[in-house]
Amino acid sequence: MPQLVRNVVVTVVAIAALFWVVGQYETALRNPRFLDGWILAGGMLAQLAYHVRKLLPALTLGRAASWLKMHVYVGYFVIAAFLLHTSFSAPETSLEWVLWILFVVVSVSGVLGLYLTRAIPARLQHMSADQVTFEQIGAARAKLAGEVDGLMLNSVKSAASAALSDYYADHLYSYFRKPRHVAAHLVGSQYPLQAMCDNLDRLESQPDTKAREVLEKLKAYVVAKFDLDHQYALQGLQHAWLFIHIPATYCLIAMSVLHTMIVYAYSSGAR
Amino acid sequence: MSIARYVKFWEAAEKFNPALRTRRNIISAWVAVLSAGLFILSIAYVSDTRHFMPGPITMSHGTLEQCTDCHTNVSKGQFGWLRAIVAPVDHDKDTKACVSCHMIGDGARNPHSLELARLDAYVKRAEASPEASKRSTSARVREAALPVDQTFPDGVPCATCHKEHNGQLFNLKSMADTQCHTCHSVQFNDFHTSHPEFDSYPFRRRTRINFDHTGHFKKHFPEWRTKKNAKQVPPTCTNCHTATAEVGYMDIKPFAEICSSCHIDQITGKERATGPKGITLLSLPGLDLETLKEKNADVGEWPEDAEGEISPLMRLLIGRDDAHRKTLKVTDELDLLDLTEATDEQIAEVRKLALEVKRLFYALTTDGMSDFFRRIKSATGARISQDLATQLSASMPLDVLLAAQREWLPSLVDEIEATPSAAQEEKDDTAPVFATDASPSESADDGALEDDASDEEKPKPVSASPADASANWRIDPFGRLIKGNQLPEEDDEEENESDEEAAEQEGDDPDAETDTADADAGETDESSEIDVDTEDWTELGGWYRKDFAILYKPVGHADPFLRAWLDLTSRLYSGNENNVAKPAFEELTGKDAQGQCMKCHSVDATRNASRLVNWEPSSPVSNESPFTKFDHRPHFGVAQKEGCFTCHGMSKAKGYLETYKGNDPYKYVPNFKLVKKETCASCHGKMQVRQDCLLCHKYHVNEVASPVMTTKIPQN
């Protein structure tokens, strides 16, 4: 049996067992919200263990990939426990809304993050020939900017084209120094690149052959920078969702502790 | 925040160049601490605690202002709840908070709010059922892992089932079928497919009112239709039955509306061909005076023509203690009109009986109904309320008693006043019961009974002769019992007359008494007697005197006298042969009993062998199947074709009336067929009609009442 199928089956069985146990618990006149609440809390702590594992890489407690798988499937189980705990309904009071929104943010960001970690590398592989790591993008961008600066200084010295150097100074200097067109990269649009190339093409009317050579080189640098920005945007997104997922998780756990305290304080007659 | 702006923020952060993960963790920790801090601050300063509820409470609980109104283990104050996190939950306290408004009786936390003994009986019956072995595996696992009795050793708190904080419009009474499966572990999925067949629904017992529907439909109504009063035959079921507002029971219309036209004469006795039409309360038994005289057993004055027996009701008045019950028992074995074979001991008991009869008449005459109730209380040990006393005596007029006394026992007063008390008599069985030659009592007081200690010590002399004594006592125009026969001549001399009468009562002027007696005798001789049948005269019911008995004729349906005596004697009834209530009850419930109450009102044997007269038909209060409910009203619209017969088909089984001869209400033959489950299932389940447990079953078998407001009356 493929591993994926096995994992899905185990998760589905675990969720079914959860529903059955909670049903029996309710039939035994216990308050099922206590049981599925503690199961939910246990699941959340298990998810937190993955985070702890990542914080402590020195500990060799299994492969990171195995931990991630566990994190993903336990996550699905926890979502089922949450739906059970909330009786598949939206909350009605402030604290409940806070908890509900936090959980939804954590869950949705987690599921989205899982999708991004699967989809973005494939997309990058498909679109970008020369891949650099996210941490190397800054250096690569600086290197590219330096090379373009050198090209344009040389062109000015050789007085190849004043119009070209003016265009560079006005429109492309900052382009090579900062990530640009992030939104367009996220949606996969080539429009900014096309626009820049069109503007450069209009400069091709200059009679100077040397200037045309510089122009062609500059276009190649623009394309390379656009490709680097593309990697930057997608890899940034790949990392950015964790800035939602993890802080929301911390917040959710803190609020859950308070929630548990309040529940037990007002649990008269309900255990 | 847009992605582009977020990236800018990220880029700025990169300038510091700490590890990305570290930055995330720092942000996360800050977010968590800030949110928790914000939450704690909100608890401290936000006065409206509804923000922290799991959900709004129902509208009916909307007036509760504080969480602590229900969560009794939580202290007041913004942080009062912190202590409650670890404090043990007091379920009793919580339940009290509920039952202070929803009064449900002592067993509020018991399953079904039933007394545990009654619940145990139900559980044992269920466990003995063959169905008990059909529990599902999940039920067995659950019972082993989560035994309910261990979770709730002191009973189930209200909040276990009635869960609040589910919204303003949430129905707190709604229950899922699974909640019933907690204890009812022989489960079924739904009504129409797997609910057990009805075993004896709706008749777990015979109907309280004995009404033979089959007999009326097939015999009586057709007969009546052929007569002039065919209009009195009800054309439809609803002429007699009507849906009530409470719980949808089909009620029975009152007797006056639906039964009276045919049956009232059976109650009042008009249709009686033989026997007295009234119930004998007091009677003078016939005695073999000759034998008594031969055996030197003096019973004093006693009418020779008396032939009757002591009535069962009178036995209750006489048998007020063991000694008198012994007397009754001994004399029961004798033919009081032929005592030639009686032993000396039996003769002595007959003499005691005669004395007791006289004492009874004397006490009733002179002491009013107080003695009557003392005797009943003494004989039965029952508490007699003022209302019951009124009904038991049916406000018997003094005239009836006095007339009887003057006719039957004219010397009664003097005889009794000259007689040793009962206690004294017990001490000295050989002493003569009645003196025969004593002079009129000079110290005859105002009719003190035999209980008077001074009387016991000093037996008083009796009057010279029965005739004289008869002349001594009468009722004055103001209804007072006085001694002396001289009537006041004029109204304005009333005061003087009263003085004279008082003097006469003291025996100051025996000559005057003799004169008055003579005068009275003369008047009697001169007047013409009216020949009237007292029984016929009492056509509308009430007290009358006939032969040597005082009788009461029922005034109509629900006669208070009959009902009171039946209630009293049924409650005190037992199979013991010495039970004084038994003969009275059997007399009143016999086949030929006056009033014919038992023709319709069935009598059940109770657990303690007493009897229960079913005055009322089945009702939500008397329903012996408290777990089941049924509302007729929603069904009227869907049963038009066959009407009531859709569910209540006539049964051809015979023996309906026979079952009422016994006292076991659970041995019965109904007039109607039992309702079948498929009749209900034809709609419930198959046609999207509700079929959950609580549609037909009740959890709280005792009604949940609301407390009445305690509004104090203004002081000023």
Image (cartoon, grey):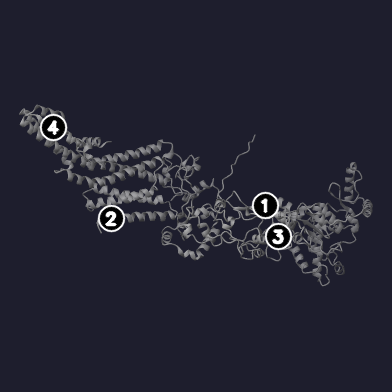
Do the dots labelled 3 and 2 sit on one chain? Answer: no
Comparing marks 3 and 2, which lies closer to the viewer? 3
Instruction: Report how far apart the C-alphas of labels 3 and 2 lie in the structure.
Output: 84 Å
- Parent chain of label 4: A
Residue position marked by numbered label 4 in the rendering: A200
Residue position marked by numbered label 3 in the rendering: B223
> Which image quadrant: the N terminus of chain B?
top left
x and y percent of residue A232 in the render?
Answer: 19, 40
* Residue A7's disc number: 2
Comparing marks 1 and 4, which lies closer to the viewer? 4
Instruction: Report how far apart the C-alphas of labels 1 and 4 lie in the structure.
Output: 107 Å
**Local secondary structure at mark 4:** helix
| Kind of residue sitting beneath label 2 | Asn
**Local secondary structure at mark 2:** helix
Residue A211, picture quadrant: top left
Residue position marked by numbered label 1 in the rendering: B254
The mark nearer the N terminus, 4 or 2, is 2
- Residue B208 relative to residue B421: left or right: left
- Parent chain of label 1: B
**Local secondary structure at mark 1:** loop
